[in-house]
Image (cartoon, rainbow, N blue to C red):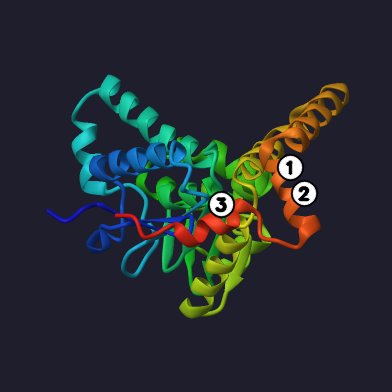
Amino acid sequence: MTAPLLADRHRGVLRLTLNRPDVRNAFNGDLIEALVAALEEARADDAVRVIVLGGAGASFCAGADLAWMKSLAARGAAQNGEDARHMAGLFGLVEGHDKPVIGRIHGAAIGGGVGLVAACDIPIAEAGTKFAFTEVRLGMAPAVISPFVVRRIGVGAARQLFVTGERFDAVEAHRIGLVNKVAHGEAALDSAVDEVASQIAKGGPRAVVACKRLARTVLGMAPAEATSHTAALIAELRASAEGQEGMRAFLTRDDPAWVKALDADGEGT
């Protein structure tokens, strides 16, 4: 049986590839389970500095597998609710992961596939990629993915795209903030992803985690709380072994220990 998810690690970069190309990498229970397990394992693996999430074949992800969804529909409301919560947990795991997640987006991202894009920290799309929230045309709604999508593109864009189900391209996805960058051609896409991943891997591992958390939380804090939190954070990082190593390396024009460790990081499975 073909594995629904491929994993490979090299120089601190873990590449997770959705591997159901015959159905355009549509989600089913096996793929969700495999992706959740891989992300949980990556959270505990200090050798993983950054995650790249992509899809095999012609498309990134076509959303939920309709045959799988049809089978779920016959299982009753309680089981359907549990399955929906499990899928929501996957998107939450991507968005809230300690390690930055880069999305390598190509071909098409439809329905839940767009939710996965929105959950990534740095989605980068090939110029020919098509996006759509097609749930409304199936008599459904993009319910589970809506919190992640609305946080990224805002209420105005979501109100239009959710109700029309219209397709839009990577340029429009960039304009509304769904993706961070558009690359022209697959080679340029790989180059852009590799460059961002390489830059992240050069950062202090503990500092990268702190920076991701900071970007997610600081705007939600009251001014006094933000001042207290950020002052405590910089004091903690400055006094840490990693912070001391970073300053030592900068002053001596040397690579810090965490960059040297990348050379020892071989390919995973």
According to the picture, the residue beneath numbered tag 2 turns out to be 247
Callout 1 amino acid: Gln
Going by the image, does 6 lie left or right of 173? left
- Residue at figure coordinates x 34%, y 70% from the top left: 58
226 sits to left or right of 28: right
Q: Residue furthest left?
A: 1
Q: Secondary structure at mark 1?
A: helix
Q: For mark 1, does the 10 Å Cα neighbourhood hold few (<14), some (14 to 19), or many (20 or more) residues? A: some
* Amino acid type, residue under disc 3 in the picture: Leu
Q: Secondary structure at mark 2?
A: helix
Instruction: Choose top left, top right, bottom left or bottom right for residue 233.
Output: top right
Query: Residue 161 shows which numbered tag?
Result: 3
Tell me where residue 47 appears, x and y as whole percent.
46, 48
Q: Which percent across, then down, holds residue 59?
A: 37, 65
Say which amino acid is labelled 2. Met
**Residue 105 against residue 139 in the figure, above or below:** below
Residues at marks 1 and 3, CA–CA distance in whole angstroms: 48 Å
Badge 3: residue crowd in 10 Å (few <14, some 14–19, many ≥20): some
Question: Which mark is drawn over residue 77?
Answer: none
Assess whether mark 2 and mark 1 are in contact (beta carbons under 8 angstroms).
yes
Q: Quadrant of residue 222?
A: top right
Q: Which residue bears the numbered disc 1?
A: 244
Q: Which of the two marks, 1 or 3, is nearer to us in this view? A: 1
Q: Residue at x 31, y 53 (%)?
A: 26
Q: Is residue 14 above or below residue 37?
A: below
Residue 61: image x %, image y %?
38, 57
What is the tally of numbered marks visible in this picture?
3
Mark closest to the chain's N terminus, 2 or 3: 3
Q: Secondary structure at mark 3?
A: helix
